[in-house]
Image (cartoon, rainbow, N blue to C red):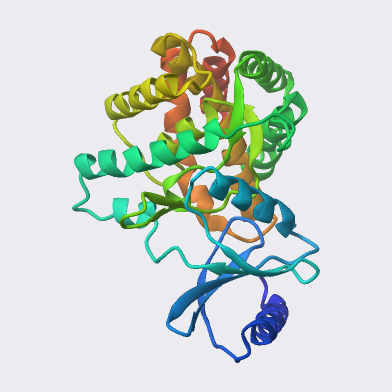
Amino acid sequence: MPSDTAQPLVDRRQEQLEQWLAEQLGVRLSGQAAGSDAGFRRYFRYQHEGRSLIAMDAPADKEDCRPFIKVAAMLAQAGVHVPEILAQDLEQGFLLLSDLGLQTYLDVMNDPDFTLDQADSYFADATEALIKFQLSSQPGQLPPYDEALLRRELTLFPEWYLQRHLGLELDEELSQLLEDLFDQLVSQILPQQNVYVHRDYMPRNLMVNQGQGVGVLDFQDAVYGPVSYDISCLFKDAFISWPEQQVTQWLQRYWSMAQQAGLPVPAQFEDFQRDCDVMVTQRHLKVIGIFARICHRDGKPRYLADAPRFFDYLNTVAQRRPELPALTQLLVALDKRVQIS
């Protein structure tokens, strides 16, 4: 957990934020925390003239607001509902945004009475919004999801999860298995066709937006990369799991809609599902590493509680993808060393 010495700095940041808001709105407001993310951004909710507003606090020495502003404009132009940017101060790291509401998809889906039929309707809206964004894709507008980035993300798994969290030594066997797996993943991901990629397109970042489909948040890390990425991310979430048969049906729906829309998905669904399995394996390994990093570096341990979910996902892929022999071998080798799932 963060130390007590950090609290005055946090308080000063909020004071600075509210002073800036007073300058923008002409009145001093008092807000309530509206959440944070796995990075350094925090959000506060304010009421002003009958309207709910969100202020983002993104310390300029740790976060860059410019990608958020750029991608928000791209999504809005594509017809996707995102927060409107009402005011900005890049030097201080403050943004004033319209409020998309109180309920995320994850909030609703965690209700014990939530049904698969309801999930089907929510995911239909999310799929439609995703396709709108992908159809607007143009090369050169967003950073490429290239080999260097893929491999940099993959190294988070051995560095932060295996070594830092589990305390494992990367002996010759583990090192070779990791190298083989990373090579197998990269070699099968790079040939995939590219579109705009949100990169965290999951229920936690999707807002229930009655009458307007779905609201989309947390898009500042968007890149130009594999068409299989976001839809795989949507159904293989960090915080909630779905029956595998249902996931396959949702993937088929997306694939059919994407084909009809002219997106560059494979001609056969089986090939697309394979691409999704390969892509999501890279993501799972990356996210496990990120969760370990924000636990040990940033003092946020709660995310690691969901690591077993990712190992379940990885085991599912390993069982049906002979194209990734090193994945099965790595999971077996890790099970011999420590109980990971």
| x then y, percent, for residue 8 | 70, 83
Quarter-of-image position of residue 317: top left
Q: Quadrant of the N terminus?
A: bottom right
The reply to whether residue 285 is visible in this rendering is: no
Q: Quadrant of the C terminus?
A: top left
Q: Give left or right: position of 66 versus 214.
A: right
The reply to whether residue 38 is visible in this rendering is: yes
Q: Nearer the viewer, residue 223 or 1?
A: 223
Compared to residue 53, the image places residue 319 above or below, namely above
Compared to residue 293, the image places residue 20 above or below, namely below
Compared to residue 219, the image places residue 336 above or below, namely above
| x then y, percent, for residue 26 | 63, 89
Q: Give left or right: position of 77 versus 175.
A: left
| x then y, percent, for residue 302 | 51, 56
Quarter-of-image position of residue 160: top right
Compared to residue 98, the image places residue 79 above or below, namely above
Q: Residue at x 41, y 65 (%)?
A: 101
| x then y, percent, for residue 230 | 51, 34
Q: Nearer the viewer, residue 240 or 96?
A: 96
Q: Residue at x 64, y 14 (%)?
A: 191
**How many numbered badges does the structure rendering display?**
0
Q: Nearer the viewer, residue 172 or 80?
A: 80
